[in-house]
């Protein structure tokens, strides 16, 4: 006899994907690594432009992102171009991802009528499916009946879907914001009708639902024209467009203001540009994950400040946020909330300490410097640096837009944008500058002019011999460059008494926690 599932069992199955994804986002953050083995990536990595190359590329990306991101997204056409061999390669990498315990999304943008729906379910959703994935992407333009059919097939098998609503390609705006002429959402935009249809599947689910939307990070202010409010959607939101397609941290904050931990940001080319070395790919994944987490944390906080009614039920990817500032009194009865300037000699591990701090406390904001040098492969404007030409830099410098500037090695110019620092400080956000000794001294002078309060933190090595070992061990500089850095390090170490706090980095996790205690004290944060 066939066992008839109870209502509770059916609901559990239909909510399974959302529960698994929210758990993964809580553990690893709101990053989805895009695996796009397009021709340039394969060529840059020295792989053949064929199905075998695509498979090798994908396996290496999986190894690098494992335990560092919430999910992976495979771009199906990048495999489909190689015919049956390409599909076989995709089948194998999906199997490998499942064995690693990685949540998989296949970006196939499928849709269709009843017989097509059945075939899609056989391919992706049902037990033993050749391309078994945790979720796939859908096109909604076959109509509500098709959408319901495909979505129900996914949910009834414990899978999920992401429905294209507001895509990251700008030319899609005119169609997606068009006004519907008939149906349940007559007079509303196409995008709003899609989002509302998707939300119905999530309405009776506790926590994050299993039916998601695709909302591009590049859509900017015209999201208001669509009538779609991401903050009111309780399923997962897959957001492409960050990085190489032009979206920056400020775009995530604009588009996803008030969301509550259900946004999953896809990044592919920024990470792939650091390959094929697995260690470099892993470091790039960790770095971009921190930036994405921080931007979405700030977006969530903006919504909280307006609503003042709590975080709701979905806090998946941002549960490791710092506690609210408490009224811990200082000499004058309030936290001082000073700007934190972080300095130390090259090789001391400032960047590593900072990355661990931001991973553990995503509410900390680290200033992004501006520079006139050209972007290196994989660097993203607004994430690694703000990239300016010489005239743009000069104009901003003359306008007083920088807190400090410097010319490094007589070549590129660097500067700390002033306005973002002032804005974050005004909002009570823990704010850090990581700069060299000369920059710190310039900040000290400029801060007096601007009336900024600053606490200066020096990261010191346990010994000079250990600093030498670390610099030589990095393997990124020539012997001449190492000698020059060590000569500079003597000067920097002798300036330690100019700083308010010294943290010895003999254990990076402890050093990060020591830095957090300084910040928590400054901003009256209790945990």
Image (cartoon, grey):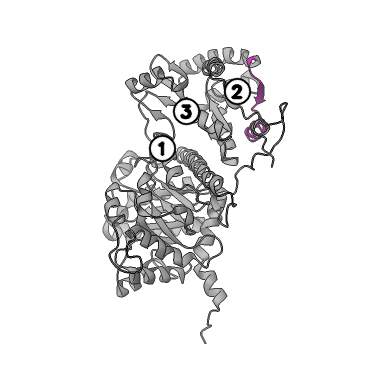
Q: Give the position of the C terminus as an image quadrant.
A: top right
In the image, residue 121 lies in the stretch drawn in magenta: no
Is the residue marked by circle 2 packed among few (<14), some (14-19), or many (20+) residues within 10 Å?
Answer: some
**Where is residue 347 shown, x and y percent of the image?**
55, 24
Label 1 sits on a secondary structure element that is loop
Q: What residue sits right under mark 3 in the picture? A: 419
Instruction: State the residue at coordinates (45%, 20%).
Output: 478
Label 2 sits on a secondary structure element that is strand
**Where is residue 90 shown, x and y percent of the image?**
36, 57
Of the numbered discs 1 and 3, the one sitting upstream in the chain is: 1
Q: Using the rendered image of the protein, determine whether residue 215 is visible from the camera's viewpoint.
A: yes
Q: Quadrant of residue 425?
A: top right
**Where is residue 359 shown, x and y percent of the image?**
57, 40
Front-lying residue, 153 or 391: 391
Measured in 3D between alpha carbons, the distance from the residue under mark 1 to the one under mark 2, in whole angstroms, is 35 Å
Q: Is residue 47 above or below residue 120?
A: above
Q: What residue sits right under mark 1 in the picture? A: 274
Front-lying residue, 395 or 416: 395
Instruction: State the residue at coordinates (56%, 37%).
Output: 358
Q: What residue sits right under mark 2 in the picture? A: 454
Q: Is residue 364 above or below residue 239?
A: above
Of the numbered discs 3 and 2, the one sitting upstream in the chain is: 3
Label 3 sits on a secondary structure element that is helix
- Looking at the rendering, the stretch of residues picked out in magenta corresponds to 498-515
Of the numbered discs 1 and 2, the one sitting upstream in the chain is: 1
Instruction: State the residue at coordinates (62%, 12%).
Output: 494
Q: Quadrant of residue 206?
A: bottom right
- Image check: 249 left or right of 107? right
Q: Nearer the viewer, mark 1 or mark 3?
A: 3
């Amino acid at each position: 006899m066939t066992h008839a599932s109870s209502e509770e069992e059916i609901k559990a199955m239909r909510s399974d994907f959302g529960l698994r994804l929210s758990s993964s986002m809580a553990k690893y953050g709101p990053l989805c690594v895009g695996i796009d083995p397009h021709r340039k990536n394969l060529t840059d990595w020295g792989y053949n432009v064929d199905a075998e190359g695509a498979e090798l590329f994908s396996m290496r990306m999986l190894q690098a992102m494992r335990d560092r991101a919430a999910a992976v997204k495979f771009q199906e056409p990048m495999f489909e171009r190689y015919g049956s061999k390409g599909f076989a390669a995709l089948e194998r990498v999906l199997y490998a991802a499942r064995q690693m315990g990685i949540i998989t999304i296949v970006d196939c943008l499928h849709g269709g009528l009843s017989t097509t729906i059945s075939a899609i379910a056989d391919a992706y959703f049902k037990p033993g499916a050749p391309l078994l994935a945790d979720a796939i992407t859908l096109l909604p333009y076959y109509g509500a009946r098709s959408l319901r059919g495909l979505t129900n097939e996914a949910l009834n098998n414990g899978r999920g879907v992401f429905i294209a609503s507001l895509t990251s390609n700008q030319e899609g705006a005119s169609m997606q914001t068009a006004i519907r002429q008939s149906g349940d959402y007559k007079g509303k935009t196409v995008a709003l009708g899609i989002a509302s249809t998707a939300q119905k599947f999530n309405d009776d689910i506790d926590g994050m639902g299993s039916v998601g939307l695709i909302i591009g990070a590049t859509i900017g202010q015209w999201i208001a024209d669509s009538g779609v409010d991401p903050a009111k959607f309780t399923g997962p939101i897959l957001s492409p467009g960050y990085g190489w397609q032009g979206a920056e941290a400020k775009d995530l904050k604009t588009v996803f203001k008030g969301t509550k931990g259900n946004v999953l940001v896809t990044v592919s080319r920024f990470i792939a540009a650091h390959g094929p070395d697995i260690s470099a790919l892993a470091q790039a994944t960790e770095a971009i994950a921190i930036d994405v987490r921080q931007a979405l944390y700030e977006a969530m906080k903006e919504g909280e400040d307006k609503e003042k009614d709590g975080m709701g039920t979905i806090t998946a990817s941002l549960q490791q946020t710092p506690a609210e500032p408490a009224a811990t009194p200082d000499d004058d009865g309030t936290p001082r909330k000073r700007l934190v300037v972080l300095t130390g000699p090259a090789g001391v591990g400032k960047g590593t300490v900072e990355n661990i701090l931001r991973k553990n406390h995503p509410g900390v904001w680290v200033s992004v410097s501006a520079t006139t040098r050209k972007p290196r492969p994989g660097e993203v404007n607004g994430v690694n640096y703000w990239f300016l030409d010489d005239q743009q830099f000069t104009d901003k410098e003359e306008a007083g837009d920088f807190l400090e500037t410097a010319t490094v090695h007589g070549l590129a110019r660097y500067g700390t944008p002033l306005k973002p620092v002032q804005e974050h400080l005004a909002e009570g956000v823990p704010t850090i500058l990581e700069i060299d000794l000369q920059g710190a001294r310039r900040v000290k002078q400029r801060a007096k002019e601007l009336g900024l309060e600053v606490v200066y933190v020096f990261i010191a090595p346990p010994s000079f011999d250990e600093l030498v070992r670390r610099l030589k061990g990095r393997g990124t500089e020539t012997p001449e460059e190492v000698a020059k850095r060590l000569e500079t390090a003597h000067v920097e170490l002798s300036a330690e008494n100019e700083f308010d706090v010294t943290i010895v980095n003999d254990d990076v996790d402890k050093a990060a926690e020591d830095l957090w205690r300084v910040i928590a004290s400054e901003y009256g944060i209790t945990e």
